[in-house]
Image: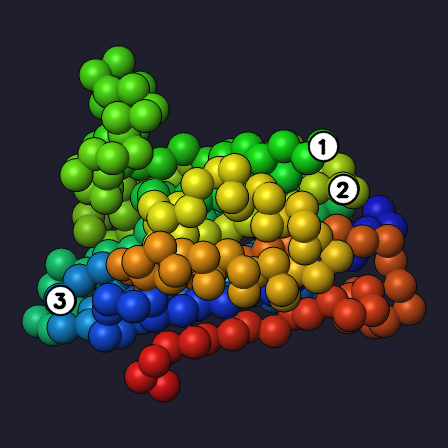
């Protein structure tokens, strides 16, 4: 919810890719709340898609109960607390179901989310799904992967270049639902009206490098639905080895459209699963 004269435009696609039978990613947003979420599930017997759906549903419902207009407008710390508590709640719900239902044993999910409020954005992440920001024509990864490879890079055992080709790059060290408690990274920063935010699963980031991501976003910035499709298509052209989920968010001056969308913008979710 932005009240500083800016509105959100959002477009997202979740695609099964070329190698998987099912899509275990889940993307969702509530444009009125300023909330955008992406989860990449894991687990046997298609339980990953259960975990990812549970995560975004539980977080949305929890935040809907506590994020009053007063908190969104003035209380950055309160927003961070609410986001963290909602993710912890989702973790508890997923873990409990994984313990109670045999077919869900061992399921879990990554999570990234953004919550826009006043002239700020609060973001949270668990796992190796990512949030990028484009500002001043430069792309920055603003989340840190919770993965074995990232820990090895942080500790000096691997270079960034070696990490890109490591066979262990998809071994994550945090996820929702795999343990009774979870540690959540939560950050808040001021936004710039020219910012573009990208939420994605590793189905994109493993196959499309930062330079190509930036090039596509800059080239198609005026049409984020096209930019989103181009990113998914490129991941599939380069192998499509995993589900590919992408959400792009841009900020615009307020228009008369009561949903806050500028002309030509899209807030649709596309699900390109081959089996649907």
Task: Look at the image and tell me whether residue 1 can be seen.
Answer: no
When the figure is inspected, residue 224 is found, relative to residue 128, above or below; the finding is below
When the figure is inspected, residue 48 is found, relative to residue 144, above or below; the finding is below
Q: Specify whether 248 is left or right of 158.
A: right
Name the residue beneath numbered marker 2: 194
Q: Position of residue 105 (x, y in %)?
A: 11, 64
When the figure is inspected, residue 95 is found, relative to residue 18, above or below; the finding is above
First in sequence, mark 3 or 2: give its number: 3
In which image quadrant can residue 230 be found?
Answer: bottom right
Q: Specify whether 195 is left or right of 11.
A: right
First in sequence, mark 3 or 1: give its number: 3
Q: Specify whether 257 is left or right of 86.
A: right
Task: Look at the image and tell me whether residue 254 can be seen.
Answer: yes
Instruction: State the separation of the CA atoms marked 3 and 1.
Output: 43 Å
Q: Which mark is residue 136?
A: 1
Q: Secondary structure at mark 1?
A: loop
Q: Nearer the viewer, residue 259 or 194?
A: 194
Name the residue beneath numbered marker 3: 44
Q: Residue at x 74, y 67 (%)?
A: 265
């Amino acid at each position: 919810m932005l009240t500083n004269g800016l509105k959100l435009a959002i477009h997202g696609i979740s695609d099964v890719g070329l190698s998987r039978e099912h899509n275990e990613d889940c993307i969702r947003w509530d444009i009125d709340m300023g909330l955008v979420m992406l989860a990449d599930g894991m687990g046997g017997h298609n339980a990953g898609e259960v975990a990812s759906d549970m995560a975004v549903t539980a977080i949305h419902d929890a935040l809907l109960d506590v994020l009053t207009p007063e908190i969104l407008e003035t209380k950055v710390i309160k927003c961070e607390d609410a986001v963290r508590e909602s993710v912890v709640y989702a973790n508890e719900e997923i873990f409990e179901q994984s313990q109670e239902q045999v077919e869900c044993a061992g399921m879990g999910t990554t999570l990234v989310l953004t919550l826009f409020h006043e002239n700020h954005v609060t973001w949270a992440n668990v796992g190796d799904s990512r949030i990028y920001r484009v500002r001043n024509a430069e792309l920055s990864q603003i989340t840190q992967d919770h993965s074995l490879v990232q820990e090895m890079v942080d500790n000096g055992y691997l270079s960034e270049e070696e990490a890109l080709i490591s066979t262990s790059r998809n071994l994550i060290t945090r996820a929702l639902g795999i343990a009774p408690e979870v540690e959540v990274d939560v950050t808040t920063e001021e936004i710039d009206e020219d910012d573009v935010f990208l939420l994605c699963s590793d189905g994109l980031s493993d196959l499309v490098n930062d330079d190509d991501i930036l090039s596509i976003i800059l080239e198609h910035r005026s049409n984020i639905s096209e930019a989103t499709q181009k990113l998914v298509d490129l991941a599939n052209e380069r192998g499509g080895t995993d589900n590919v989920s992408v959400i792009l968010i841009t900020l615009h001056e307020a228009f008369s459209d009561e949903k806050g969308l500028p002309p030509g913008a899209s807030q649709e979710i596309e699900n390109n699963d081959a089996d649907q």
